[in-house]
Structures are given as structure tokens and as C-alpha cells.
Amino acid sequence: MKHRKSRKLHRRGVSTVLKNKCCIILISKSPTDGLGFLLSCGACISHYTRACVKYYNIIMTIAEFQTACDTIAQEYTEKIAHAADLAAVEELRVASLGRKGALTELLKNLKDFSIEDKKTAGPLGNALKAKLTAALDEKTDLLAAKEINEELNKVDLDLTLPGYPVAKGHRHPLSVAQDRMTEILSQLGFEWAEGPWVEDEKHNFDLLNIPLHHPARDAQDTFFVDSKMPLVLRTHTSNVQSRYMEKHKPPLRIMAPGRVFRNDSLDATHSPVFHQIEGLYVDKNVSMADLKSDLTAFMKGLFGNKAEIRFRPSFFPFTEPSVEVDVKCVFCQGKGCNVCKGSGWIEMLGAGVVHPNVLKNCGIDPNEFSGYAFGMGVERLAMMMLNIKDIRTFYENDLRVLKQF
Ligand code: DAH
């Protein structure tokens, strides 16, 4: 230290320090005696140096600053290592890094340093702070873990015992099948669309070119809702075609999965409630060729690359021409078995080129646009995929059966 003030002040200063901060440092007779610092504790070095500056205008040298840093580091790392509990660590945090802590006090000397010394002292102070913070944090983690373990040890609890098994459900086979189909269709660019289960006759029949007198209504014998409006439980997902085309104009490409209803008695292959997926693609120049290539891609996605399809002429009022689509039996590869009833082919869905009347009814100009549509039963495909022989299996909810899929 460089002593700049009178001896008188020196004595007063020492006595002030003596009164307030009793420690070994005070055996030193003179504030210029560096030895005194080395014997003192970190906090006292800081207080002492501050006192020296205050009373004698003595400025600490950079070497002394460094020594003080080392002393504080050594003292607090030892104390932290020996801290017995979290409260003790917190006390040390305050004593070392707090507002009146050793480091803060020491750093107050910085303002008296030359720019050169500040450049050396700054990083030293930062390093000390980082070192103390790391030691304090490490010790806090250690003691916190120890305290938790001690708490746990007090409880009579064996954490190594296996837990109770959690019953895990899984998706219903119909959902599995429907998800697989919609996933493939979405890869082919079809967007999800939905329509109501309770539907008016207009959207279920009329707009789809099935007028009141038409015998096709008999083929879809359904449940009528007892209401003033002519409402039915929808007989097919084709109602989504009319609803969607009323609101959206081409190009459009949708898939509409959902529940449908028919007045059928329950047996091995029929159910009054079942599921369909409708497909509809309308744009300029859409033809039967698009239908064939897209359905082939769909079947290959579902049954593998070897899947083959064939078209048979059919009739649906909302398509012209109409077709039934068969897939080569995936069980016997077309040789003939009991699933395909010896024919080698399995009927999968109805499809066709959208009838111009349907486009017109829904406000789309059939001279400008054309489209294809298809509708398939989810149960039928699921029965094939999972080799289920009786449709009732899906609805009886016998867990012994459902758990097999
Ligand atoms: N809606 C028909 C049914 O339930 C299935 C169907 C056939 C839908 C041909 C279509 C289609 O979109 O073009 O039997």
C-alpha cells in the first residue's frame, strides 16, 4: 500500500478498525504492512483496506488485490466445503457475494485503480465471483440431494418395488382400419371433410340425382326422423359430396369418413349402422383414367405393391359411367378361396365419373368441370385386412376378441 496521509490519521484509522472488525489483521502496526492482510480473514481484508482508503487515502496495489482475491477464494472454498447444511451455505453466500460481502468490499478498491490495473483486477474479480458461485451452487445441490434422501429414508417406502400395472387400451380395429385408409388417401392429396348424420332428403338423395320416385331410394331403405322436415339418418357418406360442392368450387379433392345407417337386420355381413369413406375429385378434365390410377395407388398402399384391381360396370344414380371395383383376393392371390368364394376377386367399392346432373345441382358447370367419386365400406375392408368373418365382432365389444387386434 502506498501511505499518503499523516501518522495521526493512521492511529485513528487503526483504532477504528480495531473497534469494529477485531481480527488478526490488527496485530499489524501499520496499514502499509502487507503481512497483516495475509493473516486476516477475507472480509476483514476488504474492510481493512476500505478503512485504510477512507482514513489514510491509502490505495491498494494490484499485487495486494491479487493476494486478497486468493485469500478470499481459499477461505470461502474451505468454509463452503465444510458447510453442514443449506442454511450455512446461504450464510456463506451472503458473506462472500452479498451486498456487504467480502468480494463486494474488495471490488470497491477498483475505483481507485489506474486504467491498466483495472484491466487486470476486473477479470480477477470476475474469476473469483465465478469460482465462489460454482462452489456455492455445487454444495447447495449436494446438500439438497442429501436432505431429500434423508427425508425419504425416514419414510418406510421401498422405491425399488415394481409399480401396479396400468391397464393400457388400444384403438378399436375399425379405427385402425379407417386411419390406415385415410392416411393413404391424404398422401394422395385428399382433404378431410365431414357431413351430418341426420340429413335432409335433399342432400342425401335429391341433389345426388336420386329423385323421390327413383327405385334407387329403395336400395337404401333407411330410418326417417319423425319431424316436419323430410329428415333421414344418412344412408351413405355421399351426402358430403352435395354439401361440399354447394360451398366449395373446383378444384376439390376430399375424403369423407363417417357413420351411415340402413334399415338392415343384423347378421354376419350386414349391420344397420356401419362406416364408409367417400372420395370426390372435381377439376378440369378429370376422367375414368384418373379414377383407375388413383384407386390402384390406394389399393397398393393398403394391400402392398402386388395389389391388382378391376372395374365391373355397375349403376349408381350419381355417377355415369358407374363401376364396382374389385381387388384381386389378397388371401389366395386370385386362385380362389373361401374368402373370395372361389372367384379370385373381392368386391371393394362403388365408384364412377360424377354425373353432370349432380355437378349442375350443386352449382358447378359440367361443361367446364368433371370429376370422379367413390364410396367404400370401412367394415368390409377391415374384415379383409384383419381376417374377421363376422361384422358383429366389431360392435359386441368383447375384449377377449378386440384385444387380438
Ligand atoms: N353411396 C354408395 C353406396 O352407399 C357408394 C358409392 C358408389 C359412392 C359410387 C360413390 C360412388 O361416391 O361414386 O352404396
Image (cartoon, grey):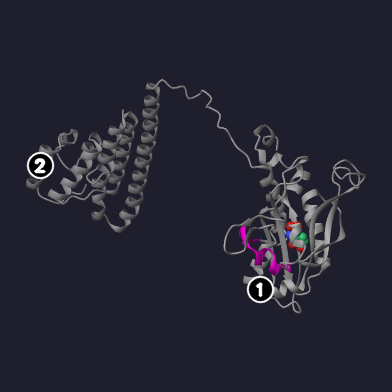
Question: What's the residue type where badge 1 is placed?
Answer: Lys
Which numbered marker is on residue 16?
A: 2
* Of 209 and 296, the residue lying toward us: 209
Residue 348 drawn at (x, y percent)? 80, 53
The reply, left or right, for residue 142 in relation to residue 101 is right
Instruction: Report whether residue 34 is seen.
Output: no
* Mark 2 residue type: Thr
Q: Residue 48: x and y, percent?
A: 18, 42
| Quadrant in which the C terminus is drawn | top right
Confirm if mark 1 falls within 8 A of ligand 1: no
**Can you give x and y, in whole percent of width and height, for residue 298 in the image?**
77, 56
The image position of residue 1, as x and y in percent, is 22, 47
- In the displayed structure, does residue 66 sit left or right of residue 206? left
Query: Which residues lie in the magenta part?
Result: 192-210
Q: Residues within 10 Å of mark 1 (few under 14, many from 20)?
A: some
Query: Which disc number belongs to residue 249?
Result: 1
Residue plotted at (73% across, 47% down) = 379
Residue in view at x 84 percent, y 46 percent: 330
Q: Which of 75 and 245 lies nearest the eye of the viewer? A: 245
Query: Ligand 1, what quadrant?
Result: bottom right
Q: Looking at the image, is 71 positioned above or below residue 258? A: above
Is residue 294 depicted above or below 44 in this figure? below
Q: Secondary structure at mark 1?
A: loop
In this rendered view, identify the residue nearer to me: 315 or 126: 315
